[in-house]
Image (cartoon, rainbow, N blue to C red):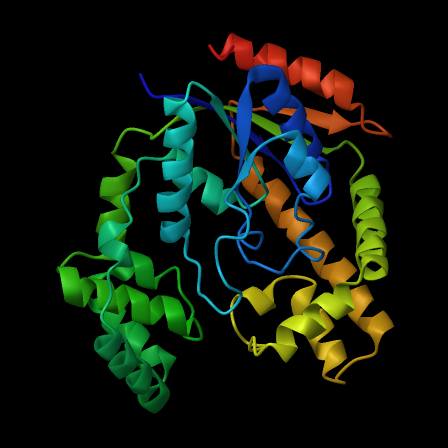
Amino acid sequence: MQPKVIVVAGPTACGKTRLGIALAQELGGEIVSADSMQVYRRMDIGTAKATAEERAAATHHMLDVAEPWEDYSVARYVEAAAACCDDILRRGKLPVIVGGTGLYIDSLLSGRDFAAREEGDEKLRASLAAEYEALGGEALLQRLRSFDPERAGKLHPADKRRIIRAIEIYTLTGTTITEHDRRSRELPGRYEAARIVLGYADRAALYARIDSRVDKMAEAGLMAEVAALLKEGVAPDCTAMQAIGYKEAALCIRGSIPEQEALARIKQNSRRYAKRQLTWFSRWEDALRISWQGKPDFERARLLSTEFSRSRGIS
């Protein structure tokens, strides 16, 4: 039997942190964040990171674990987050995984082994990158197609990073990414999860909530936060600065667009991201789904979630 955990997921701005804290307090748990951008230090406002007050209400893990200039992979997240969950379980407490990055959550829950895929060779990668620039994406995609047609069929010639990575892994291991993934899917899951998905019954209400949150981020100093990151030398094209809110704010600070245009783009991109999140979490067939009707009723959500979790053997 796999260790049990709770997952609180859903689109941005739907109250995941608040419900997660309530469940951690109710069931003797600790929060394990599953947000691909909240791992970065000094990126607090734009990522809606848990406040000091919220962190005092329940122990939080997987926040502020990387510098903004680092590339933080899903493999690195799974290794660190699994270590947190296992430590929480050893201490007799309950991991409550809270976040909106579906890939992180699914990868953590699965038994997927990222070790082989995470190993790399800088010289080989640089050589393939040079080939990509010289020959073009279609040439390298054709090479990938010769030994992994399934993976190649999912990629576009412009997808430089993924094409190079697929060729690199095959060159180093003799096994395709497709085969690595197939073997991983056959492994037993790492944890047994009671999954709870929050959302709004009315999509327009969710979008209004997102717009309001962006306005509050601006009032809280989002532009100043991004300016400080740029001033300390964080490159505008690094992974962290591609996060919604940071990319647009950086364009504004560098004089490419006015502030109101930047905020409008943040709202639009956040709404698009929420739509993708809804699509991802709709695949979870065994989840408890709580759709807010008007103003969120967190007490009712806590009761429903607690009852659901206990029905899954969590107490």
Q: Of residues 51 and 292, which is closer to you in this image?
A: 51
Q: Is residue 37 left or right of residue 106?
A: right
Q: Residue 81, position in %: x, y?
A: 42, 41
Q: Position of residue 178 (x, y in %)?
A: 27, 52
- In this view, the residue farthest toward the bottom is 134
Would you place residue 181 above or below residue 186 in this image?
below
Q: Look at the image and tell me whether residue 207 can be seen.
A: yes
The x and y percentages for residue 124 are: 22, 76
Residue drawn where x is 53% and y is 8% of the image: 311
Determine which quarter of the picture holds residue 242: bottom right
Corner quadrant of residue 122: bottom left
Where is 121 relative to 269, above or below?
below
Q: Pinpoint residue 141: horizontal percent, then vertical percent.
A: 31, 73
In the image, 89: left or right of 62? left
Residue at 41% x, 52% y is 74
Quarter of the picture containing the N terminus is top left
The correct choice, above or below, for 90 with respect to 67 in the image is above
Residue 291 quadrant:
top right
Picture residue at 28% right of the left edge, 28% below the top? 188
Judge whether residue 145 can be spotted in this image: no
Question: Count the marks: how many?
Answer: 0
Depth check: give the residue in front, 223 or 228: 228
